[in-house]
Image (cartoon, rainbow, N blue to C red):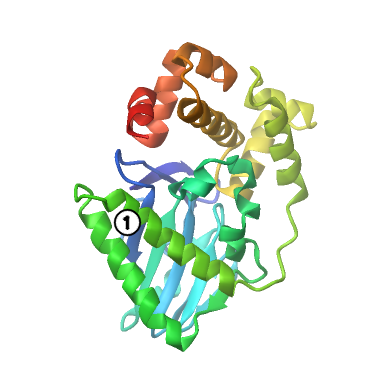
Amino acid sequence: MRSVRTVRADGTPVYRWEQSAGMPPVQVVPLDPDCEGEHLPPDHRHAHDFWVLAYVARGGGAVGLDGETVELREGEVHAVAPGEVVAAESLAELDHARAWSVAFTPDAIPSLASISPLTWAHHPLLALFAAEGRRAVVPVAERPRWEAWLAELTDELRHPDRLGARDAVTATLTNILVATARLAPATPIAPDPLVTRVFDEIERTYATKASAGDIARSLGYTPGHLTTVIRQRTGRTLLDWLTERRLTEARRLLRETDLPLSVISVRAGLGDPGYLVRRFKARYGITPDRWRRDG
């Protein structure tokens, strides 16, 4: 479900999401201190371009997040934002614990898939990712329900061909995100001014032929520098975000109109239909025509 997108100058790998056809972009995995990866540094330091919720049902441990040690305590849910560097050298303490991580991209949820990805960080369902500390405590009475949700989500993802599996995954993830958002602290993290400026410029120009380089130069930066900074702060490059916004518009047009791909590709800023098909299939695992038929 994930592969190395790039490796930062300090050796930190940044993982990307690889979409599987027919299922929402969601994965549930146990927090395993013994998970060895050929790309991981000795302290398991890594980042990713997707979103992660970690829930500790029993036991505890600690991880490093962007250079700070974060304790993982029983009953807590933690939000790990895209671009945040995780150093999991302390996960050995979870040997006798019960914990999971839920990795996803927000467009797994229909209400989020239909809006600009540039606004995801401010959506109420993702409130914990924008809250100070990015952690919350699940009330004791609600913890059995959380374990049931995670078990159900894991089971549905293991049987993608089962009738209604996709809808079941989406519904269960929505329940988890709603419950998480209701627990989120009221104090939000201040928006990143540079990321806000970049996203505003993408929103203004995505439907044109503007390139990532054009956007960087319009904001007074070199393309290489701005790409590096945006990747460090959001987990994705400037071009990734520009392409994501264009693909979201392409999906909207596929869903709401009968326009041919030749017109949709131009209106979404993707140039020609061949390029639209390649980018769409790489991102969602299926062609635009199939997505339109199945939608």
Name the residue located 50 percent from the left edge and 23 percent from the top edge. 257
Q: Where residue 233 sits in the image (x, y, percent)?
A: 63, 50
Q: Where residue 188 sits in the image (x, y, percent)?
A: 71, 65
Name the residue located 69 percent from the left edge and 39 percent from the top edge. 199
Q: Quadrant of the C terminus?
A: top left
Position of 267 relative to 162 (above/below): above
Position of 210 relative to 19 (above/below): above
Position of 138 relative to 230 (above/below): below
Name the residue located 39 percent from the left edge and 31 percent from the top edge. 282
Position of 263 relative to 213 (above/below): above
Which residue reaches farthest right?
Answer: 220
Q: Viewer-proximal residue, 110 or 284?
A: 110
Note whether residue 32 is visible: no
Place residue 36 in its image quadrant: bottom left
Name the residue located 34 percent from the left edge and 61 percent from the top edge. 28
Which amino acid type is shown beneath numbered disc 1? Ala
Q: Name the residue under label 1.
A: 168
Place residue 205 in its image quadrant: top right
